[in-house]
Image (spheres, rainbow, N blue to C red):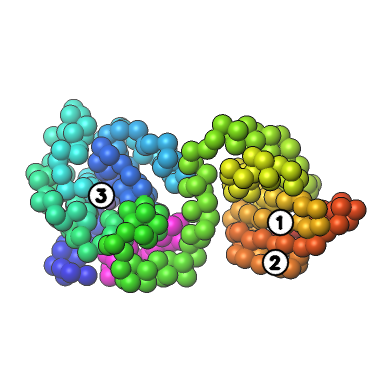
Amino acid sequence: MTNKKTITEIETFIKTHSHFLIVQADNPDGDSLGSALALEHILGDMKKQTSMYCGVDVPEYLKFLSGWDRVSKTIPTSIDAVIIVDTSAQILLENLAAAPEYPWVASKPTLILDHHSEVICDIPQASIILCDNSYVSTGELIYEIGKTLHWKMSVAAQEKIMQSILSDTLGLSTEATTAITYRRMAEMLEAGVDRYALDESRKLLSKMDRSVYLFKADLIKRTEFYGDNKEVALVVIPEDELYGVGTLYNPAPLILNEMTMVEGVKMAIVIKRYKNRVTGALRATSQSPVANKIATVFGGGGHPYAAGFKMDATPSSFSDIKSDIIRKTLELIQ
Ligand SMILES: [Mn+2]
């Protein structure tokens, strides 16, 4: 961490205030939203109150980040400090500056956390500025502050931090991504963040062909539910579909996350049925992260939340295999 004095100031700033308004600029992105949500988690774990503000609506493509709907254009009357994330430019806070409450907001102690240090901070009310472009994202900066100050950073908080890094580095592909970022990513993975699930949920929101969209509707209609409380959701995709619309978009990620969104569902399974082979893709919810255990039974493997398997299957054995998969899944998710 570059500046010890600033870190100490931040520590005091957090300790001495109780309700923080976390502000994103008028051009929210994966980093600003990820940073805001990470702070919400971290400060919440400290029993601090937080409110998230953005002067514009959260864009559609960011709505895979759970918690986005807590970002509001309303400024609560009880805040006693402000944290502005991912910008140092007043011009990007136009909507906040136009709000009738702005003079009151600006009178509160304000911390700026940013990584655009090529921009000189011109936010007049800034009381503490930590802006350092050696961090690929503001979320990464928050991660380092958290480590330095021994903040509790839950898996949920780290998931948001990881997303902030993935967003600003376009999936760790930018030049600014150094070994240090990879190391931090590795630490977050070790802490339990599921990058694969994160990526998949993001991809789900990317554009798709109309035929894929209609195919998805069809898959939803064909979803079968099993178990006393319909804990298992299952879709079978026959081979011919895989060579048709299935070539435009992998049907498993197209549908798996949707399936886990159904209330009560603990495990989502997509079975692709080929002539002499069956593949299974599994996606678990937090109530039952045993996807890998199920996949292992059928000769596959993977992660607790996402796993897969592949096995030989003749057309006549398919219904038995399917029954086995359902039975074993119901057994293991208990
Ligand atoms: Mn950023």
Q: Note whether ligand 1 is within 8 Å of mark 2.
A: no
Say whether residue 330 is left or right of residue 23.
right
- Residue 58 x/y as whole percent: 37, 37
**Residue 297 location, quadrant:** bottom right
* Label 2–label 1 contact, CB within 8 A: yes
* Badge number at residue 85: 3
Compared to residue 99, the image places residue 219 above or below, namely below
> Taking 168 as reference, is 93 above or below it?
above
Tell me the kind of residue under disc 1: Gly
Quarter of the C terminus within the rendering: bottom right
Q: Position of residue 316 (x, y in %)?
A: 90, 53
229 horizontally vs 80: left or right: right
x and y, in percent, of residue 13 in the image? 20, 57
Query: Viewed as shown, does residue 303 lie left or right of 17?
Result: right
Label 3 residue SS? strand
Q: Earlier in the sequence, mark 2 or mark 1?
A: 1
Depth check, front residue: 82 or 241: 241
What's drawn in magenta, residue-wise?
A: 141-159
Query: How far separated are the C-alphas under marks 2 and 1?
Result: 9 Å
Look at the numbered disc 2 and give the secondary structure of its residue: loop
Q: Is residue 315 visible?
A: yes
The residue that disc 1 covers is 280
